[in-house]
Amino acid sequence: MTYYSLVRDMTKFNYRFWVVKKALEVGISKAAREFKTTRKTVRKWRDRYEKKNLQGLKDQSRRPKSVPNQMAQEDEEKVVNLRESHKKWGARRLKERYRLKGSERAIHRVIAQRCELNKGRKRAKKRRNLSEMKKQLKFFEKSQVDTKDLSDILNYWPAMKFLNLSRYEYALRELSTGASFFAYADENNSTYAGLFAEYVLEHLKSYGIDTARIAWQTDNGSEYIGSVNKKSNSLSAFEEALARFKVGHNRIPPRCSWMQGDVETFNRIVEDEFFDVESFKNNTQFLGKTYAYQLYFNYIRTNRYRDNKSPVMILKKRFPNVDPNVLNLPPIRLESLLNNPAKSGYHVPAPAQREHELT
């Protein structure tokens, strides 16, 4: 599936969500007029939402419940075995040469669904399409945000338990350069998600980035949207923070975590390269090492899926007028912001004498 079809599906989900939200607020007729659709359509999505919640807003499968003329299992196995022996042969050639049962279309379906070679080529094409798309994005136009539970990392768990280190990592991955910001907290809730949003957005604002032109994408975790079953239309702390900075908020459909691929990839990388290899003596050392890794990731580490360039290299080439220090945001424990009315002022610029090393 291409990027554009993914975005199309995600947009449909968000559109249906706002149609249903408006219908629950003002009624079906007014919602239909405002979104320029029919009352029948509004009623359909409202009823599905009330019956299945967010799952009801996803496209329903049109696959028939039964296929009377489906190929027999033994014939499918024969197709798979022949395809493995003739990796470049298509359905037509296999059918003609070996007089296989079933139509060319049925044989092609078996190859598409069950042959690993075919699946591998599709994944590679999808990655190339996404890479080209990211090269067209403006700086910080789109980002993905996610929360990771660190307690399942075997090497980190003892330090977390006995040194009282943070359990949750709040992470943001910017799509045009691949740069990442992250912070830590003891709990996973909307308060800390909101504090993380303010911490990052104040930083971006201090570098002259217009937050009204950017959009963040999240899943439907309660830390981002509040209670899924809430009756009121009140915003979560995270949503309120985005609203104050006029940042757009896109939510992926339920059980579609692959649409958060960039930030999920960062979570895997930071686990493999940092948490699985580092040790910590106290919280000060933990924050120091996380800051060092943040600088390494954004300024030094190259990404083979981005033409073997680091985020700062991409930034300097595509956005030469942007200060490279914008990628320097120290990770913090979000608890430190709870009793501090000034949510800015935490930025520590890279030392001038090391600037050439980071670039």
Image: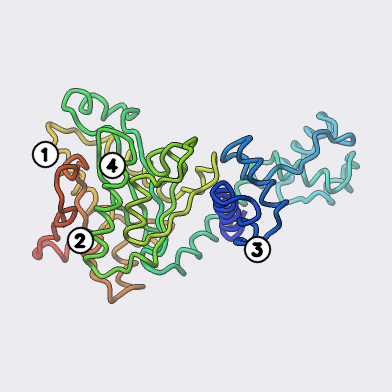
Which mark's residue is nearer the viewer, 2 or 4? 4
Q: CA separation, marks 4 and 1?
A: 20 Å
Mark 1 vs mark 3: in front: 3
Label annotation for residue 284: 1
Q: Amino acid at mark 3?
A: Lys
**Other-residue count near label 4 (Cα within 10 Å), few / some / many at <14 / 14–19 / ≥20:** many
Gap between marks 3 and 2 measured at Cα: 52 Å
Few, some or many residues within 10 Å of mark 2 (<14, 14–19, 20+):
some
Q: Real-space Cα distance between discs 2 and 1? A: 23 Å
Using residue 146 as the reference point, say whether residue 181 is left or right of it: left
Query: Image quadrant of residue 334?
Result: top left
Q: Amino acid at mark 1?
A: Thr
Distance from the alpha carbon under mark 2 to that under mark 4: 30 Å
Disc 4 marks a residue whose amino acid type is Tyr
Circle 3 Cα neighbour tier, 10 Å, few/some/many (<14 / 14–19 / ≥20): few
Residue position marked by numbered label 4 in the rendering? 192
Q: Is residue 39 above or below residue 166?
A: below
Q: Who is closer to the viewer here, 274 or 173?
A: 173
Q: Where residue 36 is drawn, which disc sits there?
A: 3
Earlier along the polypeptide chain: callout 4 or callout 1?
4
- The residue indicated by pointer 2 is 358
Dot 2 or dot 4: first in sequence order is 4
